[in-house]
Amino acid sequence: MRVSILDDYFDTLRRLPCFRKLDGFDVTVWTDHVQDRDALVERLRDTEVLVLFRERTRITGELLDRLPKLKLISQRSVYPHIDIEACTRNGVLVSSNMHAGTPSYAAAELTWGLILSGMRQIPEQMASLKAGHWQMGVGRTLRGRLLGLYGYGRIAGALAGYAKAFGMDVVWWSSEAGRARAMAAGETIAASREAFFAEPDIVSVHVRLKPTTRGIITKRDLAEMRPDALFVNTSRAGLVEDGALLAALNAGRPGQAAIDVFDIEPVTDPADPLLSHKNVIATPHIGYVTEDEFELQFSDIFDQITAYAEGAPIHMINPEVWASRVSIGIEI
């Protein structure tokens, strides 16, 4: 079975123990990023199983219509980048382990690193020192400050633990159901949405991107933040209303942002307005990019492939595709 893996920028997967799960498959690993449809069609023409690195490549209906040999897409977590309806129409099964109950500690750790970097001016202090200068400013201690966590989920829960270890107070906001769970767990809920954005020293967003959460952080929300506050987003750029973060930073509320995600990725233009903003600390979507996290994620992804090859697919997003094949006796 021909397997193609897209966007393994540093050819990392071959070096991981989990890659042995693909022994016996005909595997091609692509280390560059291509989004051009014609180039992808040429690249994937004979592919039967496609492995995705999260949202690095969008899988559109127009692309799927030109890949008649494709039978399975195997990935992990949410799938806003995949046209599931087009997959079903083309008879392509999508398997994606939603890893219930397992937080991404890699993403939580990066978020905490960005918080520390923003509050202690680490990137600016390093740049000053390397430029032949000494200290460039005065940072702020975390102990005793207030962290606002938007989204009562697994990654935010890990962040709350880090914050408490650093002597910070934590306040929450989320959906109504999320607030109810947080309250039942004895957590502190903000008195209102406005208070949630207005009071913390730091606001960090941890929500999955789906149609109902796109643009959930609005211009009005950001305008409530203090001029000395830090806004952190390592989840998805689409959670913030289009253009709202740049406009808010230009208006001085919040005073600073630390981000790991962008509307269009990869970002390669150093003049990008958000990337080049003097009050932005940015990383290139590396929240999940660690060897440990890759081993965890791709072990699941490769298990999905072997399960499919054995005729017992798992973690099916569009199970009707498999049911249809079984009903008419199509072999994989």
Image (tube, rainbow, N blue to C red):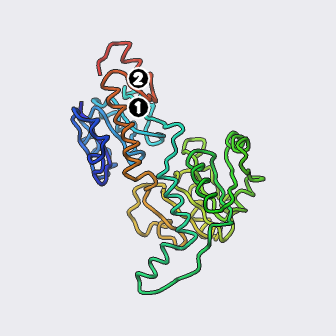
Badge 1 crowding class, 10 Å Cα cut-off, few under 14, some 14 to 19, many 20 or more, is: many
Q: Which residue does the image show at 32% across and 37% down from the upper left?
A: 50
Q: Which residue is mark 2?
A: 321
Would residue 6 appear left or right of 178 to someone viewing this image? left
Which of the marked residues, 1 or 2, is nearer the chain's N terminus? 1
Amino acid type at circle 2 is Val
Q: Which residue is mark 1?
A: 94
Front-lying residue, 114 or 282: 114
Image quadrant in which you'd find residue 213: top right
Would residue 253 appear left or right of 131 to someone viewing this image? right
Q: Which residue does the image show at 44% across and 78% down from the upper left?
A: 127
Asked whether the beta carbons under mark 1 and mark 2 sit within 8 Å of each other, the answer is yes
Q: Which residue does the image show at 38% across and 47% down from the upper left?
A: 294
Image quadrant in which you'd find residue 71: top left
Amino acid type at circle 1 is Val
Front-lying residue, 164 or 124: 164
The percent coordinates of residue 281 (x first, y second) are 50, 67
Q: Is residue 70 above or below residue 131?
A: above
Dot 1: element: strand
Image quadrant in which you'd find residue 43: top left
